[in-house]
Image: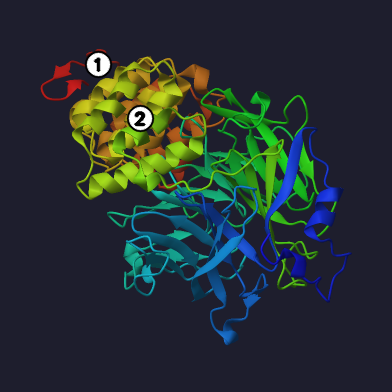
Amino acid sequence: MLSLAHAEPPKEAAFKYLSPDEAIAKMKSPEGFVVNAFAAEPDCQQPFAFTFDERGRVWLCENLNYETRRSDLYNLGPQGRIVILTDTDGDGEMDERKVFKDKIMFPTGIALGHGGVWVGSPPNLLFIPDRNRDDIPDAEPEIKLDGWGRQDRHETLNSFLWGPDGWLYGTHGVFTHSNVGKPGASDSDRQKINAGVWRYHPLNEKFEVFAYGTSNPWGLDFDENGQAFVTACVIPHMFHIIQGGRYHRQAGRHFNPYVYDDIKTIADHRHPSAHGGARFYLADQFPEKYRKKLFMCNIHMHGVLVDEIKRKGSGYVASDPKWGGTFSMSNDPQWLGFNMEIGPDGSLYAIDWHDSDICGRKVLHRKTGRIWRYSWGKQSFPVGMDLTKLPDEELVEMHLHPNEWYVRQSRRLLQERALAGKIKPATLGGLRKILDEHEDPARRLRALWTLQLVGGLGDVMLAPLLNDKAEYIRAWAIQLIAEDKRVPDAVLEKWAVMAREDKSAVVRLFLASAMQRVDHAKRWDVLTALVSHVEDKSDHNLPLLIWYALEPLVVTDEDRTAEVVDACKIPKVSEYIARRRKAGGKAAAVKPRPKGPKAKPAKAVSGKGLV
């Protein structure tokens, strides 16, 4: 490893400083796994966030501005930098280092794509253009969003990740207060967030709070069905994140006083409190029992843990796997992992801040940091790859790859080609073939998401998918149709039928979520149908997701509210309707409406397919 032999131990330390080799000797991992340092000091210092590019190189944020969690070395000016680490000989250790950009203030998150580098640098979300991919910035950073708070340096924008829908996702903690918008935006054009998951669209430049709540989430990933999960600190560690959800907060109140209750953890077990990083193992190097499991770092346990995510109702339960949830323990109190990636080689990577002050009250080691690599046996690293040089058909074929890393890279590259007008017509046919014919719903979803991003879908082609045999295909058709908040009336009619008749709790959950993106006056039929499912009364998510969409309606229309009350088989929703009406100066009880004829089934609509 470049310069590793010349690393010197910190002068101030609460515990004995261990070199990377000494640290590895103390680690305890499952038999058959090999751990090595992909990078370490002095080539890796104060690591805060990292990601892989399409050439398999690591892009690392070194946050040299960090002093304590509530103050920083701003008097010294920006000290952070982005470095590129490359393994040129395939031994799993970096041997080439290049500074891409220095003098960045407090870099907290990083993502690559759409002609440059996206960096969190509170109070800003930055875009550093590098459209010719020569690893030299084309210009100074552009401020895409501002208003990000930094009251608590642990809890500002972080955990950047491209979602399957093409948005840039990230998380945000509870003790930092942000009011986010484009530079110069008025307060009315901004959105507040002080805990939750946010997203930003790189093309139309829209910013949204995807879900509110949790504590200090510092880990975000999507499973093979496109469901988001975050890991959290202090409060229970695992949450299934649904668009429009409100989640258990560590402190403070929700912005909407009529939420009344929020969605709790999906974990059925507890760990010591601080978790960071989240990656589903959707690759093929590890033994099969690890596939689809969610890996995370635990800061207080100084190691890597793993949860098994199992379906229950509309959502999930996170449990210790039957063989145990401890994956690798460092046995080193200075091991502080809080961010993870799955690499192109199928290995698991974790950054280690490497300091004995767990909560960041003081930085004892200013020049330390490691990136650990966990592999099943001794594994080489692919050298010389560059997915940008592959033709469209090979990127389409990669949608069937057993390592999700290749799928996500291929999706983004095809989207970029489509935006540049360089995608081949046959490419859409190849993706459509996977969507229409593949037996695995997860592979079909991969094709569906990419088709949407390359312009190969629209309401006309999405509507028939509302009748698909796979529940997550139906669910994602709902979410994609609702994306622009302009849902055709004919589709809403179909959704009302689905809300009554679809046997999938997942589909009903996506319908409840989508209602928050529909005009108030057009929500009634779907919500009235959703509350009629007695089987959902104890569901982890549905009663509250339905309520969040229904809440603003129940003080606006007496007759329609009465219809909902008459149909409602979910006690919590009935209780909250009465409570909300009373808070709004209305009578808590409403008179039931006379029962009318049942709604007619959906019919075929010209140009829209069966809706």
Residue 438 % position (x, y):
38, 18
Q: Residue at x 64, y 43 (%)?
A: 348
Q: In this view, does 390 lie above or below 499?
A: below
Front residue of this view, candidates 297 and 92: 92
Task: Measure the C-alpha gap from mark 2 to mark 1.
Answer: 35 Å
Question: Tag 2's secondary structure?
Answer: helix
Q: Is residue 44 above or below residue 208?
A: below
Instruction: Tell me the amino acid under the disc marked 1.
Output: Ala
Quadrant into which the N terminus falls: bottom right
**Residue 371 picture quarter:** bottom right
Front residue of this view, candidates 380 and 223: 380
**Residue 430 picture quarter:** top left
Q: Find disc 2 in the rendering and name its residue.
A: 447
Question: Tag 1's secondary structure?
Answer: loop
Q: Find disc 1 in the rendering and name its residue.
A: 599
Question: What residue occupies the far front of the structure in this picture?
Answer: 89
Judge the density around disc 2: few (<14), some (14-19), many (≥20) Cα neighbours within 10 Å. Answer: many
Residue 310 % position (x, y):
61, 25
Whichever of labels 2 and 1 marks the residue nearer the N terminus, that label is 2
Q: Is residue 376 above or below residue 372?
A: above
Q: Which residue is drawn at 73% across and 57% down?
A: 336
Front residue of this view, candidates 99 and 216: 99
Q: Which residue is drawn at 69% across and 43% down?
A: 374
Residue 521 % position (x, y):
25, 38
Rendered image coloring scheme: rainbow
Instruction: Tell me the amino acid under the disc marked 2.
Output: Ala
Query: Is residue 293 left or right of 200 when viewed as pictured?
Result: right
Residue 408 % position (x, y):
44, 40
Front residue of this view, candidates 158 and 209: 158
Q: Is residue 199 above or below residue 33?
A: below
